[in-house]
Image (cartoon, helix red, strand yellow):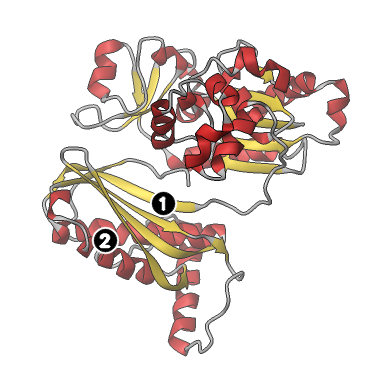
Amino acid sequence: MFALVDVNAMFASCAAAEEPSLRGLPLVVAGDPSDRRSIVLTASYEARAYGVRTAMPVREAMRLCPDVRIVPPDRQLYERYSRHLFATLEAFTPIVRPVSIDEGYLDLTGCPGLQAGPVALAAEIRRTVFERTALYVSIGLAEGPWLAKMAADLAKKRSDGILLLCPEDMPQAVWPLSVDAFHGIGPKTAAKLRGLGIRTIGDLATTDPARLRSFGVQGPRMRRLARGEEQGSLPEESGPLSLSHEETFARDVRDQEELHPALVALCDRVAERLRREGFVAQSLGLRLRNKDFRDFSRQGPLPAPSTRAEDLRRAAESLLGRMPATAFPCRLIGVTAHGLTKAGATAPELFPDDLAERRDRLWQAVSAVRERFGPDAVKPLGAEATRPSRRPSGQSKG
C-alpha cells in the first residue's frame, strides 16, 4: 500500500502557519503588488473561491478579491516547513520518497498502523502533520504509486482530504477525467491523444492498443495505468532530476551584457545548492523569457561533472551566446543543473591538479561561511555590478 502526501497550497499554508491571524483569509503569495508584472505564486483555497489562480497577475487577483492579503515569497520558510513535514512522515515509515518541497510518497507496507486500515492510518498521518506543522495535507492511497498520485489529486476535493483508490474504482472515479489530468502526461502528449479521439482517461483505458503504436513503449504503459493495472514500487531514492534557480526582473533587460550579473549570481546559487544537497551536475540549461512571454531554452554538457560556480558560469555564458536576438528584451532568466548524481558517484579526474583541489577546498569554505552567517555573507564577483533591480521569483521544484 502506497500513500502520496501533498500539502494544500504550500506557500500560503506556511505563511498562515507562521502568522495564525492569516488563517481562513483569502491569501496569495506574490511579488510586489505595485509591479504590474507581479504574478500569484500560490493562492489559499479561500482566495481560489473568488477565482484567484496561480500565475494570475496580482492586479487581477486584487480586482477579483479586493480583501485579498498579499505576502511575499520566503523560500527559507518553505524549506524549514518541508523539513518538518518529511521528518514527521518518517515517524510512520522509513520509506519516504520526496517528490518536491511539498509532496512525497510513502511505502506503508508493514507499518504497524496499517492494521487499523489504510484510511485510518492516513487520518492519523494527517492529524499528526497538522499538530506538528499546522499544515493541512491531502493523502491518496492505492496499491501503486501512480494511482496514489491520482487519488491525492482527487482527495483535495474531499472534506477529509483522504481517498483510497482501488482498480475497481477506476471507471467511476478516474475514467471521466480529461487526459490532461493523467499524471505524467504533458500538454503535447495530451494534444496528440486528443488528435486520435482519446479525450478522457476512460477513452485511453478502453482504446485498441494498436491506436497507441505511435507512442512507442509508453503507449501500452499509459493504457495499463489508465486501467488500474499498475504493478509498481517506489523507485530507489536518487534525488531530484535537476536543480534550478530563476529570477524575474522589475524591468526588461536589454542585452547580454546587462544580463551577465544576474547570470553570475544564479550560477553561484545553483552551485551552492548542489554542494549543500550533495550532488554534482553533468549538464546545464539556460532559459530566457522575453517581454512577450516567449521562452527560449538552451542546454549543453559540462566538460566534467561539477559543483563549481565558475564551471556553471562558463557553460551558461556559452549557452547565452547561442540565444537569438529575439530573446531580448528579457524579463526572466533561469539556470538549471541537469544530470545530477550523488557526489562521489562519478569517476574522479584521471589527472587532478592542485589548482582544482584548492578550488574545491575554497568552495567548501565558502559554503561553511554561508551556512554560519547567511547566504549573503560571501557573494560572487560581478554578481551585483550594474545589476537591474529585480523581484524574487523563487526556485523551481527540481
* Residue 5 visible in the displayed image: no
Examine the image and state in which quarter residue 187 appears.
Answer: top left
Label 2 neighbour load within 10 Å: few <14, some 14-19, many 20+: some
Question: Looking at the rendered structure, which numbered label has been put on residue 244?
Answer: 1
Is residue 103 depicted above or below 158 in this figure? Answer: below
Q: Secondary structure at mark 2?
A: loop
What residue sits 40% from the left and 19% below the top? 27
The residue that appears at 47% across and 41% down in the rendered structure is: 214
Q: Nearer the viewer, residue 140 or 209?
A: 209
Name the spot of residue 374 as percent of width and height, x first.
Answer: 44, 55
**Which residue is the site of mark 2?**
383
Looking at the rendered structure, the kind of residue marked 1 is Ser
Going 37% across and 56% down the picture, which residue do you hit? 376
**Left or right of 126, for residue 322:** left
User: CB of mark 1 within 8 Å of CB of mark 2?
Assistant: no
Residue type marked 2:
Ala
Q: Earlier in the sequence, mark 1 or mark 2?
A: 1
Q: Secondary structure at mark 1?
A: strand
Number of other residues with Cα within 10 Å of mark 1, as a class: few under 14, some 14 to 19, many 20 or more: many
Q: CA distance from mark 1 to mark 2?
A: 17 Å
In the displayed structure, 206 sits above or below 85; it is above
In this view of the protein, which residue sits in the foreground, 45 or 383?
A: 45
x, y (%) of residue 32?
26, 31
Q: Is residue 293 above or below residue 65?
A: below
